[in-house]
Amino acid sequence: MLAKTYGSAVFGVDAQIITIEVNVGQGIGFFMVGLADSAVKESQQRVEASLKYFGYKMPRQKLVVNLAPADIKKEGSSYDLPIALCTLVTSEQITCELNTEDYIILGELSLDGILRPIKGVLPIAIEARKRGFKGFVLPAENAHEAAIVNNIDIIPVENLTDAIAFFEGKLKIDPLVVDTRDLFFTSQNEYEADFEHVQGQENIKRALEITAAGGHNAIMIGPPGAGKTMLARRIPSILPPLSLPEALETTKIHSVAGRLGKQATLVSTRPFRAPHHSISDVALVGGGSYPQPGEISLAHNGVLFLDELPEFKRSVLEVMRQPLEERKVSISRAKMSVEYPANFMLIASMNPCPCGYYNHPERECVCAPGVVQKYLNKISGPLLDRIDLHVEVTPVSFDQISSTRKSESSEQIRERVIKARQRQIARFKDRKEIYSNAMMTPEMVKEICVIEEVGKALLRKAMERLGLSARAYDRILKVSRTIADLADSDNIKVEHLAEAIQYRSLDRDNWAG
């Protein structure tokens, strides 16, 4: 007798339906076919122990489990539940009133039959609805995540007996329904960190406002304790709120990586990822034997913060160059190739030298001659070329720290940022996949960032006197266009250019002595 149901496998951020067939015939032995990895093959022991725990028997005949299509690698422990149910059906130990072929069934079994959570539930639910399945039977801990998808019955089960009783018609389980839109819109602005708690640093706040308004990458250079990390952690609070499509895409990535907790729904706030400088290149961009998203993909639609940038390994920083340009990362292996989105804002911070006090207004740098330049050279020119704003952070004075005057809140800054972004969306409405000034190509910069003769003279003089490199030219024009958008100006004026020029500190020939 043959029993059949359906599961799913996740590749990248998309799911593919897997047919699970179990057949009991003459002979003895347990055989699993269909390119299953060790975790899938070990389901035999978990399924057998779970069945015995609830008084069922594992057939002592030849039992064949087929996972189709056979040429796709299956991994993980999520096939335990469908294999157990099909085994009971094909050995005639249970009779199902509901058709198992109408449902996607997934879940990892513990030895006592309790269902443990699995990864990648959201893309699976999306694919199940697309394919017209009636419902999705899964562990209760994953149910809220799957319930993000409407028009499909989400059936949460706690253990194997609940699943058996449900298909036998002995237990009615109401589909879980979650008002995703209500939860999403009510939690969009829930950020713990706010710029109103930052005293002083008004010039840095202005630079970060420009960064957020244009989607630019930025690096903050300053001594220890100047507030670089504190300021960076507040950047998501001034970015425009996530749209529903952005939230869905972001949630899919976190679902595949297994980063969504219990009772998780849509990711409603922009991600902020701050990996330690000891991170490997695979952990940063993604990969592994079975490719998983890395930190740059987990920061998709949000902020990737690299604290103490020169301390990161050179190879780790260099692998970011292509994702920064293409806003996606492709991971290729011998038998598969997956693509993860990686549209993030890169915010970095660093000390100006090993001792941390080069250019400090009060303390003297003790680094030997040439050490400062050597320290800066840890960051390659091509990577620095992809960073639009270089912001010098100075320590806050006692008067500023002790001031009781309230600073501008993140909500007030965000309103200006949203207004500037709306101008950009209107500007790029006919251009595919471009919606911010930072994404402009060199050809678009020439077309859109037109400056007057007075502005050209200023820019020429700045490049000559400050020793700015040629790569700074396009960056200055992009940033000046964002500053003009914040000022609600159609044209780039001289004052906009002048402000943009000051954000190219590391391009000055004499910056490091």
Image (tube, grey):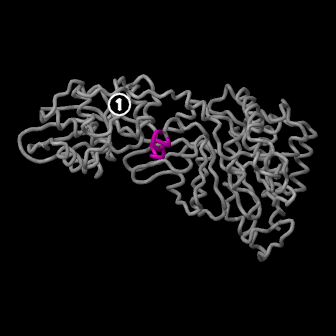
Asked whether 99 or 5 is in front, the reply is 99
Magenta stretch contains residue 139 = no
Magenta stretch contains residue 262 = yes
Looking at the image, residue 388 sits to the left or right of residue 67; the answer is: right
Q: Say whether residue 442 is visible.
A: no
Which residue is disc 1 drawn over?
155
Instruction: Give coordinates of residue 436: x percent, y percent.
Output: 70, 36
| Residue drawn 43% across the image and 44% down it | 337
Asked whether 263 or 441 is in front, the reply is 263
**Quarter-wise, where is residue 129 in the image?**
top left
Disc 1 crowd, CA 10 A, few/some/many (<14, 14-19, 20+): many
Instruction: Give coordinates of residue 47: x percent, y percent.
Output: 22, 45
Looking at the image, residue 54 sits to the left or right of residue 350; the answer is: left
Q: Which residues are magenta?
A: 253-263
Instruction: Give coordinates of residue 279: x percent, y percent.
Output: 54, 60
The C terminus appears in which quarter of the rendering?
bottom right
Q: Say whether residue 113 is visible.
A: yes
SS assignment for the magenta stretch, majority: loop
Q: Secondary structure at mark 1?
A: strand
Question: Please, is residue 471 above or below residue 450 in the view?
Answer: below
Question: Please, is residue 136 above or below residue 291 in the view?
Answer: above
Looking at the image, residue 186 sits to the left or right of residue 99; the answer is: right
| Residue drawn 18% across the image and 38% down it | 87
**Quarter-wise, where is residue 126 in the image?**
top left
- Say what amino acid the circle numbered 1 marks: Ile
**Quarter-wise, where is residue 170 in the image?**
top left
| Residue drawn 30% across the image and 44% down it | 114
Question: Please, is residue 333 above or below residue 378 in the view?
Answer: above
